[in-house]
Image (cartoon, rainbow, N blue to C red):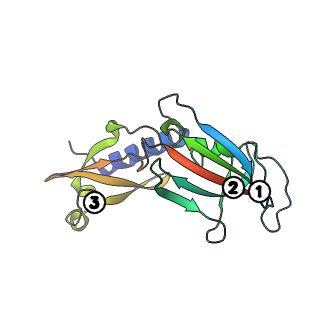
Amino acid sequence: MKRSIYAVFLTALIVLTAMAAGCTSGNQAQTQTQTQTPTGTPASGAVNDGIVKEGSTVSVYYVGTLDDGTVFDKAVKGTDKPLTFVVGSGSVIKGFDNAVLGMKAGETTKVHLTPDMAYGEYNDQLIQEFDKSIFGDSDASTLKVNDTVYLTSPNGVFPAKIHAIGNESITLDLNHRLAGQNLNFEITVDSVA
């Protein structure tokens, strides 16, 4: 079935809205343990001793791993800038948001997130076919299965993986690359405002 570029944008908008709203199935729990770091000090210049709550602006360092120990993302103190976000704004996954609630600057937590608290379960309905013309003549000829392409929607740009290529269509996997995965984070709160 052929679809216009508008269908791509509409689908992208629906997917991004669902991801942002945390629309996933399942009732699996998250587990969390909390410990104090050896230094227990906030970032340089930070004087806020507040507790992280909904609406707090928090900066954190973290390491994210899969269950097999593979690091998929990180922001490490001394080499990277901290991740800064407003708790409850939807700018990070639900389980990450929940993990920092109640923490103070200098505290570290380890959390195990099931897919319902992360990027959701893998959804076969997010494998969709589009007309090749949306990529333009020159772009479509260079694409291969498993390539990542970037789609634009009103909510920004997001990646999709090429699942199959036909004569006149390209099938894209619109699932997040970490959909269906358990995620583990070690998170250290650097500052709270």
Residue contact between numbered discs 1 and 2, judged by CB atoms under 8 Å: yes
Locate the N terminus by quadrant. top left
Q: Residue furthest left?
A: 167
Sequence-earlier tag: 3 or 2: 3
> Tag 3, which secondary structure?
helix
Looking at the picture, which amino acid does disc 3 mark?
A: Phe
Residue 43 appears in the picture as rendered: yes
Q: Which mark is residue 35?
A: none
Q: Report, in whole angstroms, how far the alpha carbon at label 1 lies from the one at label 2.
A: 6 Å
From the viewer's perspective, is residue 136 above or below residue 67?
A: below
Residue 55 placed where, x, y %? 74, 45
Sequence-earlier tag: 1 or 3: 1
For the point 28% across and 60% down, the residue is: 135
Q: Report, in whole angstroms, how far the alpha carbon at label 1 lies from the one at label 3.
A: 47 Å
Residue 88 appears in the picture as rendered: no
For the point 44% across and 48% down, the residue is: 178
From the viewer's perspective, is residue 49 above or below residue 123?
A: below
Q: What residue is disc 3 on?
A: 135
Q: What residue is disc 1 on?
A: 106
Sequence-earlier tag: 1 or 2: 1
Residue 168 placed where, x, y %? 16, 52
Q: Going by the image, does 126 lie left or right of 39?
A: left
Q: Residues within 10 Å of mark 3 (few under 14, many from 20)?
A: some
User: In the image, which is nearer the foreground, mark 3 or mark 2?
Assistant: 2
Q: Report, in whole angstroms, how far the alpha carbon at label 3 lies from the one at label 2.
A: 42 Å
Count all numbered tags in the image, as a single digit: 3
Q: Nearer the viewer, residue 58 or 68?
A: 68
Which quadrant of the view contains residue 62?
bottom right
Residue 81 placed where, x, y %? 64, 67
Q: Which mark is residue 188?
A: 2
Residue contact between numbered discs 3 and 2, judged by CB atoms under 8 Å: no
Q: Going by the image, does 28 lie left or right of 104?
A: left
